[in-house]
Amino acid sequence: MKKPKRIFQLLLLLSLVVVFIGGYTFIQFYFRPGNIEGRITFKFLLSLKKVHQPAVLVNSSNELEKALVWLESTNKNKKISIAPPRHTKLPVIEIEYPSKPPHHRITNLRKNQTLVAINNSNTIHNIRLTSRKNQKFNIVVPPKGSNQYDIQFEECELHMILSCDLHPFEQEYVSVFDHHLFAVTDQHGKFKIKDVPAGTYLLKAWHPKLGEVEQKVKIWGTRTTDVQIEFPKNQ
């Protein structure tokens, strides 16, 4: 009788080990970061009087270029904050003048990351910051790269405007985040956000001429979540 009992105990122990390993593996998979890939399209449902068409970059497949995409918490009272890995130096972001009309530029960076303004033209430019939270400035940038200006933003803020009074078509939309969960669509309207912690988020998309749309997205495990966004929404 002792031998069957011992075999039963061993089988029970083995079963518990299998359950533990399986549960641990599932939890590790579920809570590991995933990715978001998506595409943004623009349906021509708005009057052209409302949208200055040359400023909206859309290809033959209605895919929208130069739209900002980012994640927010579904809880309005909670903000996403993800510190960069220890000993990681954030890269310097460069913006060059002059820019080409009539299309806007979108630049995104993290709080306290350095933005460098460089003038490679033969013409003088000025950079005026329009902001609600960060300190405003208006600086002159001499021609031909004789000076470059390092800019840092201490507060997170969306859609600040860097403009040039001498060249009104030059507009740079700058957004500052406390995380890495943002992207800008390419010429095919595509974007990718990597290493997204598991959870449910608000995925937001913004274009300076078309406004903002949002939808909920759920991330779990190492899987890649595909999303489709359309401007304008419900119009």
Image (spheres, grey):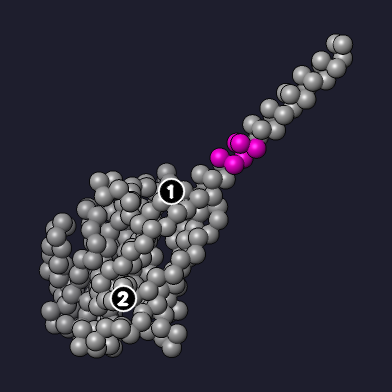
Q: Indicate the position of residue 183 as horizontal and vertical percent values.
A: 39, 65
Q: How many marks?
A: 2
Q: Which residue sits at x=24%, y=55%?
A: 156
Q: Indicate the position of residue 127 as horizontal and vertical percent values.
A: 17, 72
- The residue to which callout 2 is attached is 232
Residue span colored magenta: 22-27
**In this rendering, position of residue 115 left or right of residue 19:** left
Q: Answer yes or no: is residue 106 visible.
A: no
Question: Residue 199 bears which disc, if any?
Answer: 1
Q: Secondary structure at mark 1?
A: strand
CA gap between label 1 and label 2 equals: 27 Å
Q: Amino acid at mark 1?
A: Gly
| Secondary structure, magenta segment, majority class | helix
Q: Residues within 10 Å of mark 1 (few under 14, many from 20)?
A: some
Q: Quadrant of the N terminus?
A: top right
Q: Indicate the position of residue 22 as horizontal and vertical percent values.
A: 65, 37
